[in-house]
């Protein structure tokens, strides 16, 4: 039986520093056996001892102890009321937009992950919801986009893939004034560098597939909410849509989170080195990296985050150079996704941002010469040497 003292211990864990919280999670050890690695409760259903007596668990679509441990951990790390772990970042966003009713209006970053755009454009717009995409770093444009029907703001900062930075505190104030919710996709920086709920956001979403998992071996999504009413929304959505993360995948994400601080530091450090090298390369014509002092979002990012992350986008001199780079990398892997230990290079125009209409993509700068790189935790000299030989 679960001993109440473990819940007291859980409260005390909230007082730990971030680097300790990632290691010790929610309950951390198994309350029943003391197993240091939280168990994988690989079960679909739970036995009731007798009529009217329940362990608190009924059926794993509703609640599963391993998933709950991940959810508790994410609520602690993002400093939220409750968290929910889904089968993908897309599944988390489907439940998020499930808050909307026909006629509701949402303001989103103009440069956004293609899958999020697809959810809005292909699913929720058909249900009568309306979406406006704005340059979130321009607060006048954000204010001008507000309508009486605006119910939510959805911000990525930095954005995928153009690395634009939005001022979370300022947008939270605009959202509050409009009586709307602010959701921040915190996939790129993770709570290690940025905690949007402490800056005024109402909901944080993640592709847990990325840095939280960290090893390119699980597809997962996370939503963290700041209050109980929002928690009830996500609980109901998960129960009905049946998209809660399975126990083994939950355990893998929990295991990944234990090294989140170490990995994020190394991604950050490596990306700074690689970005400096890329900036001086004759075939690199434009570079998008939040850690450069001349990046337009540099100071806003520093006012709300403690690092820049591991993502860099850049434009090379020709389509041929881009294709050669993607084909000739050896250690670096030409693959979609980001945030894992391995450095991955991606071609947004045909991969991650394929769903975005071509005119919007080109206006943003996503063209045939544009590549995105997720800097891994390898030796940075090897990453640079590989890029150098592939761009020769
Ligand atoms: C910023 C961002 N949000 C959400 C998603 C969707 O997450 P998933 O692929 O886990 O469904 C992605 C995926 O690349 C992403 O990059």
Image (tube, rainbow, N blue to C red):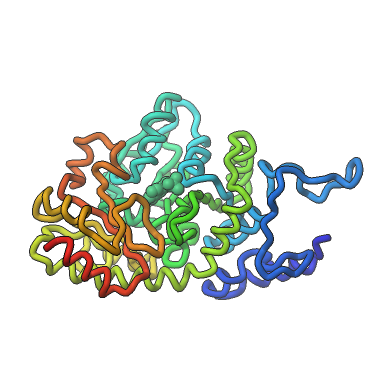
Task: Count up the numbered dots.
Answer: 0
Residue 35's image quarter? bottom right
Residue 242's image quarter? top right
Image spot of residue 263 (x, y percent)? 43, 70
Q: Residue at x 22, y 70 (%)?
A: 384
Of 96 and 134, the residue lying toward us = 96
Q: Is residue 139 left or right of residue 44?
A: left
- Can residue 323 be seen in this snapshot? yes
- Can residue 163 be seen in this snapshot? no
Q: Residue at x 43, y 29 (%)?
A: 123
Q: Is residue 362 above or below residue 284?
A: above
Name the quarter where the N terminus is drawn.
bottom right
Q: Is residue 365 left or right of residue 198?
A: left
Q: Is residue 382 above or below residue 45?
A: below
Q: Residue at x 18, y 47 (%)?
A: 365
Q: Is residue 28 above or below residue 127?
A: below
Image spot of residue 262 (x, y percent)? 45, 73
Q: Is residue 124 left or right of residue 351?
A: right
Image spot of residue 283 (x, y percent)? 10, 60
Image spot of residue 54 (x, y percent)? 84, 47
Q: Residue at x 19, y 51 (%)?
A: 370
């Amino acid at each position: 039986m679960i001993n109440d003292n473990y819940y007291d211990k859980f409260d005390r864990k909230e007082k730990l520093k971030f680097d300790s919280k990632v290691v010790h999670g929610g309950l951390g050890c198994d309350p029943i056996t003391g197993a240091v690695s939280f168990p994988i409760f690989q079960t679909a259903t739970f036995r009731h001892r007798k009529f009217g007596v329940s362990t608190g668990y009924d059926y794993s679509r509703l609640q599963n102890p391993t998933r709950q441990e991940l959810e508790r951990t994410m609520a602690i790390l993002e400093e939220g009321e409750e968290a929910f772990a889904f089968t993908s970042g897309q599944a988390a966003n489907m439940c998020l937009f499930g808050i909307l009713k026909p006629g509701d209006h949402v303001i989103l970053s103009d440069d956004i992950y293609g899958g999020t755009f697809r959810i809005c454009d292909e699913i929720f717009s058909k249900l009568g919801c309306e979406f406006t995409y704005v340059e979130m770093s321009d607060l006048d444009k954000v204010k001008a986009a507000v309508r009486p029907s605006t119910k939510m703001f959805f911000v990525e900062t930095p954005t995928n893939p153009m690395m634009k930075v939005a001022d979370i505190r300022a947008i939270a104030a605009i959202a509050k004034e409009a009586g709307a919710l602010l959701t921040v996709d915190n996939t790129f920086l993770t709570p290690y560098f940025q905690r949007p709920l402490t800056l005024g956001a109402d909901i944080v979403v993640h592709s847990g597939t990325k840095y939280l998992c960290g090893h390119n071996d699980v597809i997962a999504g996370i939503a963290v909410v700041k209050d109980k009413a929002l928690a009830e929304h996500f609980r109901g959505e998960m129960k009905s849509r049946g998209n809660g993360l399975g126990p083994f995948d939950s355990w893998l994400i929990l295991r990944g989170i234990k090294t989140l601080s170490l990995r994020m530091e190394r991604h950050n450090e490596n990306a700074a080195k690689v970005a400096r090298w890329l900036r001086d390369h004759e075939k690199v014509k434009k570079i998008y990296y939040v850690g450069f002092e001349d990046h337009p979002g540099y100071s806003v990012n520093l006012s709300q985050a403690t690092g820049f992350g591991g993502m860099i986008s850049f434009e090379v001199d020709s389509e041929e150079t881009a294709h050669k780079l993607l084909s000739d990398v050896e250690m670096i892997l030409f693959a979609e996704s980001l945030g894992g230990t391995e450095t991955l290079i991606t071609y947004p125009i045909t991969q991650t941002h394929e769903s975005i209409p071509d005119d919007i993509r080109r206006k943003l700068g996503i063209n045939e010469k544009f590549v995105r790189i997720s800097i891994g935790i390898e030796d940075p000299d090897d990453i640079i040497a590989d890029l150098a030989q592939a761009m020769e």
